[in-house]
Image: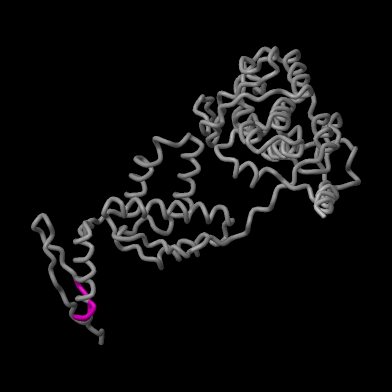
Amino acid sequence: MKKENPKLCTKAITLPDGTRKYVRAKTKEALEEKVTQLRMEQRAGVNIADNTTFSEFAQMWVDVYKRPHLSKSGLDDLLRTLNRLIMPTLASYKLRDIKPVHIQRMMADISGYSHRSQSKALATARAVFDAAVDNNIIMRSPVPTTLKARGKMTEEKTPLTREQTDRLLTAVEGTRAYAPVVLMLGLGLRREEALGLMWADIDFGAHCVHVRRTNVFSDSTNVVSENMKSAAAKRDIPMAPWVEEALLKVHRLDAQSLYVAPAADGRPMTPASFRSAWRAVTSRTTYDPELLGTPVPKHPEIIRTLDFHAHPHLLRHTCVTRWVEDGLTPKEVQYLAGHSTPNLTMGVYAHYDRAGQFTETAAKLRALG
């Protein structure tokens, strides 16, 4: 015989608009505890009748707090964090019903992601709930202050050596990849900045490049815009002699397009055309020592000359690291890299070359006595 559910204890709380909110619990003690909590929230100005879900409020938070102030790439990154890492767990819950245990569940659900991704999810969730507190929807955030992201830490990027950069430039000379490689490796441009650069932005007389626009990829499309990643991204970068010489060579061979690193049709590169251009790097790369120096099957004109992995962001990382190693001040490097703060410059990009710099570091320490 099916056991009947025990009768719930019920009590009504009068709301400011005269309507009633009914509170239910299994015992009188639990009911009084709920009522006491709700009345305390009422006195604090919280709207205890609010039924907004996390998904509804998060969308409003993005539109009001974030969308007006973020670049397209920044907004896309935020939406990826929300939609991929947070919404699957919290979307359907009412804000007022979310407890610390639900946040712990969210973090458990994304435990397979990197430490960086988990940190972004946790910070975003905190920001959404803090805004809900500010708007009197909840009394306090359910995100525990002691909760920390876990996950695998991103490995420190090792910049290319000077010998590797020379080999890379030689390998891709004459291909569609040459111009973006020069721009990222020699000027520290982000990929989207390199692909948005126009010949009008280069002042060969003043030996300077004016970074003013970006080519933003989104799925299979792209948009060239003057809406930079941040105010600091708009900058002027002096050209080293080898960079200027390389760009003059590109200009003499392919000056029909308005863009320094265009697709084959002269228009700005799309995600597909960039992948096609970057094959000039990957097709010449092998990790098998026996294949180094041999031609690629079906493309005998292409010789495998690279035995290291080179991706676009590593080239920028290498350039910024070289600036630090060559003695530029942190503020100079911050400006040239287009960073908003020096912490990012020195903490992420200024790689310590343990093999090459250990002797120099040891000499400095010994000199201190």
Q: Nearer the viewer, residue 336 or 295?
A: 336
Task: Please indicate whether residue 65 sits to the left or right of residue 22 in the image.
Answer: right
Residue at the spot 33% in from the left edge and 59% down from the top edge:
93
Quarter of the figure that contains the N terminus: bottom left
Rendered position, 216 above or below 130: above
Q: Position of residue 209 (x, y in %)?
A: 65, 21
Residue at the spot 44% in from the left edge and 51% down from the top edge:
124
Residue at the spot 31% in from the left edge and 55% down from the top edge:
133
Residue 28 lies in the magenta-colored region: yes
Q: Position of residue 192 (x, y in %)?
A: 60, 31
Task: Please indicate whether residue 128 sits to the left or right of residue 212 in the image.
Answer: left
Colour mapping: one colour
Residue at the spot 76% in from the left edge and 32% down from the top edge:
280
Residue 349 lies in the magenta-colored region: no
Task: Choose top left, top right, bottom left or bottom right for residue 232.
Answer: top right
- Given the current orientation, which residue lies at the most extreme left position? 18
Magenta residues span 24-30
